[in-house]
Amino acid sequence: MTGSGDPVDSDAPTDSGGSVRDLDPATTPNHPAPRPETRLVEGVLVVDDLDAFLADLEAIREETGAVVQAFDADRVVDAAHLRLATRLAARSIARGEAVARDPAVEILVYAAGRRQIDRALDLGVSPGERRAALVVADFGDVTGADGEDDDAHPPADLESAVASVEDLLSAGPEPTLGAFDEEAVRDYYGVTDRELDATVGDLPDVVRERVALLDVEK
């Protein structure tokens, strides 16, 4: 497991040519964003039945109030990628601009850098054994996160949620983020050699820009 409510800007890159810090609309003074406390759980999942696995995540949400989303770690460039997507999803929900009704799916949409939910779902886990990273977040302070307009929500029990998510891992928590599949990432995000050559930063910088630009382009 990595991190637990780190300062929001601690994971953002400081320079990538056109840096994510400059692009990130969650940091603009005119539009302050909710900053949900977020934990990342890393490890290997063995998913025999995808529907049953998703039902397990939903049961954790119902029991703890936490927003939980699972990702294929081979297509996630780093922890900052998921933290940026989580806080931009919270901002989108709070402003009534969410693409998805489910906050967990909205996080997935932002992490994927695209509004097409069906395509974004490819960034999640699928049946079989795979390296995974799971976002566990408290959206209790995010207006509209439960489908209601009022902004008074009980906080999530993140400790219990993290423990329950860790129980789903095949061998307990172990690092998975940072060792992504470059070919899979470039294919999924459509990153060309020409784009990389024109970027001051590296592939993770390009992906984080995709995430930030999804909000900027609304």
Image (spheres, rainbow, N blue to C red):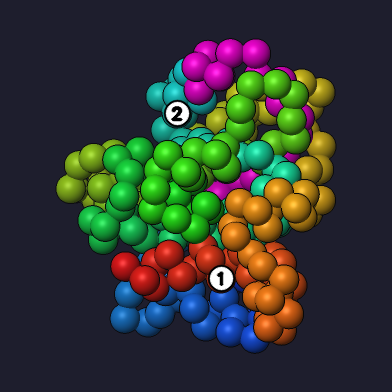
Tag on residue 61? Answer: 2
Q: Image quadrant of residue 77?
A: bottom right
Dot 2 amino acid type: Arg
Say which element carries label 2. helix
- SS state under label 1: helix
Q: Indicate which label's residue lies in the foreground, 1 or 2.
A: 1
Residue projecting furthest to the left: 149
Q: Is residue 118 left or right of residue 84?
A: left
Q: Is residue 93 visible?
A: yes
Front residue of 116/110: it is 116
Q: 191 and 26: which one is in front? A: 191
What are the residue bounds of the magenta stretch? 36-54
Q: Is residue 181 left or right of residue 122?
A: right
Q: Quadrant of the N terminus?
A: top right
* 36 or 96: nearer the viewer: 96
> In the shown orientation, is residue 113 left or right of residue 99?
right
Q: Which residue is mark 1?
A: 209
Q: Is 150 located above or below residue 159 in the figure? A: below
Q: Nearer the viewer, residue 168 or 163?
A: 168
